[in-house]
Image: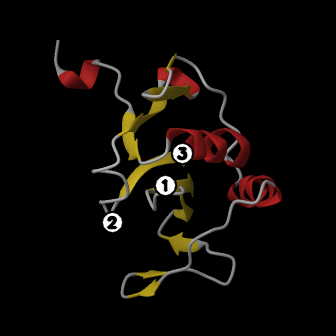
Amino acid sequence: MGLSDCRVEAAVAVSDLERARRFYEEGLGLAPGEQEEGVSTRYPCAGGTAIFIYFAPDNAGKSTATLAGWFVDDLGETMDDLGSRGVTFERYDQPGLATDERGVFQGPGFRAAWVTDPDGNTLAITQE
């Protein structure tokens, strides 16, 4: 069996597990699954996928790349829901990546928006 036949999940380092849990649970609306107190929390998502946050202050927020992303049916509706929870969306104005005033990037065949967690880890929300 090759890796393409196996489940995969995103792993995100955070510097303050309780602060991160508030963002992922209250802001993003994720329900916690498996937890190891003071160490990590796994948030199950659709299709057997998950996002795993773990306490690693020396690594938290070090990547400037997008670390994980969700595919949604309606980006505007999802942004409205997250915005009502206090989540803000990143705005970009750089070559190849310019968002509108709301934070939406229009690509070929998709629209996307990005949020950052309290450590600055970047997460994408995409509608194909």
State whether residue 128 appears in this view. Answer: no
**Secondary element at image label 2:** loop
Q: Quadrant of the N terminus?
A: top left
Pointer 1 and pointer 3: residues touching (CB < 8 Å)?
A: yes
Q: Position of residue 69 (x, y in %)?
A: 48, 48
Outermost residue to the right = 84
Q: Which callout, 1 or 3, points to the residue nearer the camera?
A: 1
In the image, is 43 to the left or to the right of 56? right
| Residue at left offset 61%, top offset 42% | 24
Identify the residue shown where x is 58% and y is 39%: 18
Tell me, for residue 112, which label it has, or none.
Answer: none
Characterize the local packing of mark 1: few (<14), some (14-19) or many (20 or more) Cα atoms within 10 angstroms: some
The front one of 74 and 13 is 13
**Which quarter of the figure has residue 80?**
bottom right
Report the residue marked by disc 3. Answer: 70
| Residue 110 in view of the camera | yes
- Of helix, strand and loop, which one carries label 3? strand
**Front label number (3 vs 2):** 2
- Residue that carries the numbered disc 2 in the rendered image: 64
Q: Are marks 2 and 1 in contact (CB under 8 Å)?
A: no
The relative height of residue 101 versus residue 43 in the rendered view (above or below) is: below
Q: CA distance from mark 1 to mark 3?
A: 8 Å
Label 1 sits on residue:
123
Distance, label 3 to label 2, CA atoms, is: 18 Å
Q: Is residue 93 above or below residue 25?
A: below
- Amino acid under disc 2: Thr
Badge 3 amino acid: Trp
Residue 52 position, x and y percent, is 44, 32
User: Can you name the residue that lies furthest to the left here?
Assistant: 2
